Image (cartoon, grey):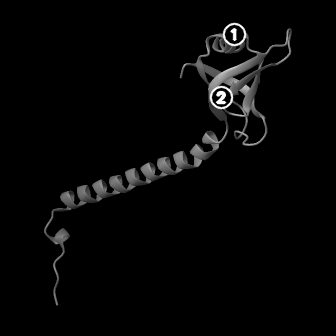
């Protein structure tokens, strides 16, 4: 039995263009899949590398000189625990003191790998940022 193939009806130029287009589409798919896979692999390490909490600054313990100051954030008014983060940055300490006196809601980001779930004072690590009224 004799079968016809579409390439028998096309000129060589048209057939070559179709092959080139198909190869380009395959390459583009490979690039897209590689980019998606790389992004998926990177996300868990970034997402789990910090402790972010929102609440009210309960108190600030300041230490003069080069010592670390501690900022304590309570996530709710009835919460029996606080998250503490340490810093030497005067701007972060000033922002925390402002939040204490004005009872402004804040969001903190600490360097702890995960936010602890036990204890009355939970260590969030070194303070990376403090946002007033998030």
The image's mark for residue 104 is: none
User: Can you say whether 43 is above or below 125 in the image?
Assistant: below
Tell me which corner region of the image, top left, top right, bottom left or bottom right, holds residue 63.
Answer: top right
Q: Which residue is mark 2?
A: 109
Residue 80: where, in percent of width, then height? Answer: 72, 34
Of the pair 51 and 14, the residue shown nearer to us? 51
Q: Which residue is mark 1?
A: 94
Q: Residue at x 37, y 56 (%)?
A: 26
Residue 53: where, in percent of width, then height? Answer: 63, 31
Tell me which corner region of the image, top left, top right, bottom left or bottom right, holds residue 99.
Answer: top right
Q: Residue at x 24, y 58 (%)?
A: 18
Of the pair 87 and 39, the residue shown nearer to us? 87
Of the pair 78 and 47, the residue shown nearer to us? 78
Residue 65: where, in percent of width, then height? Answer: 86, 9
Judged from the image, the secondary structure of the residue bearing numbered disc 1 is helix
User: Can you say whether 48 is above or below 99 in the image?
Assistant: below
Residue 50: where, in percent of width, then height? Answer: 67, 35
Dot 1 crowding, Cα within 10 Å, few <14, some 14–19, many 20+: few
């Amino acid at each position: 039995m004799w079968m016809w193939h579409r390439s028998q009806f096309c000129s060589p130029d048209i057939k070559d263009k179709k092959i080139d287009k198909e190869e380009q589409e395959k390459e583009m798919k490979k690039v897209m899949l590689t980019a998606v896979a790389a992004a998926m692999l990177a996300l868990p390490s970034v997402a789990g590398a910090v402790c972010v909490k929102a609440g009210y600054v309960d108190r600030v313990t300041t230490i003069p000189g080069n010592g670390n100051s501690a900022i304590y954030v309570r996530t709710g008014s009835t919460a029996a625990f606080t998250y503490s983060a340490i810093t030497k940055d005067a701007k972060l300490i000033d922002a925390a003191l402002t939040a204490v006196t004005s009872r402004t809601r804040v969001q903190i980001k600490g360097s702890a790998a995960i936010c602890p779930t036990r204890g009355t004072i939970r260590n969030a690590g070194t303070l990376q940022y403090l946002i007033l009224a998030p």
